[in-house]
Amino acid sequence: MDTFLVLKALAQWALPPASMAVGLVIAGVLALMRWRRLAWAAAAAAVLPTLALSWPPVCDALILSLEKEAHAQAATQTCCYNAIVVLGGGVTPAAPPFTLQPDLGDGADRMWYAAQLFHRGVAPRIIVSGGGFMADNNGGPATTEAEAMRRFLKDLGVPDRAIVSEDKSLNTIQNIERVRDMVNDGRVALVTSAYHMRRSMAIAERLGLKASAFPTDFHLPAEARPWWENWAPSPASLSWSVVALREYLALLFDRRRGG
């Protein structure tokens, strides 16, 4: 099985809310076996981390640490790149017959920012990178991330002739490896979410892609939120915490190299 799929599956079950479900099942089994103390310990170990990660101060600490590095890496040169590269992850492709239109997620800021950079003259073309598990190149619904992004960019006023699609990759390493093969020694403006920029730039350096960081999709800090939202656990905080933890896990364990 592909390492990417193994890592995805492990991360899915190692992090909330799936990890809480697994822990509670284990607690239930221990309770049935009359190991009550172990059952309570397993239940606490399942529930408490999920509650902690749902708490906004914990979420902010995790995600803002990644975004601080994105701020530090952000490019100051805003012209003369060979291409603007938008990494996959900002949109969910269509999945016929269940959904016929792509779903714009939080990362859709990536396309918006790429269109802005293009209209400013940062580069003459945009490379959109990202495949799909249900890819079907039949001219119908946009079943790859690259195709979904291409259509969105056209709606944002980017000419079709200026958009180049890389629609085979399924993860960040493949995104960058395939883009590197497309641009060779050309320098690119790399657009992705701020929390994802540290890992993306590390992979770009490792694989020999000459990239400058253009982060977007920043998390809203505590100062910009109503005070009561900063102390009440919430699904949104849990979601951001899990996103950050996945990045940290990938930085720690993913040492794959491209060809």
Image (tube, rainbow, N blue to C red):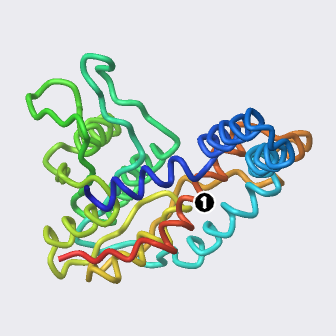
Q: What residue is rendered at 80% in x and 49% in y?
A: 38
Determine whether 7 is above or below 50 in the image: below
Q: Quadrant of residue 20?
A: top right
Q: Residue furthest front?
A: 33
Q: What residue is rendered at 77% in x and 51% in y?
A: 45
Give left or right: position of 80 versus 240: left
Q: Residue furthest top?
A: 97
Determine whether 176 is above or below 9 in the image: below
Task: Give the residue type that dot 1 points to.
Answer: Leu
Q: What residue is rendered at 53% in x and 47% in y?
A: 13
Camera-side residue: 22 or 61? 22
Determine whether 145 is above or below 82 in the image: above
x and y, in percent, of residue 197 in the image: 48, 67
Q: Quadrant of residue 232?
A: top right
Q: What residue is rendered at 25% in x and 66% in y?
A: 83
- Residues packed near mark 1 inside 10 Å, few (<14), some (14 to 19) or many (20 plus): some
Q: Residue furthest left?
A: 138
Camera-side residue: 122 or 150? 150
* Quadrant into which the C terminus falls: bottom left
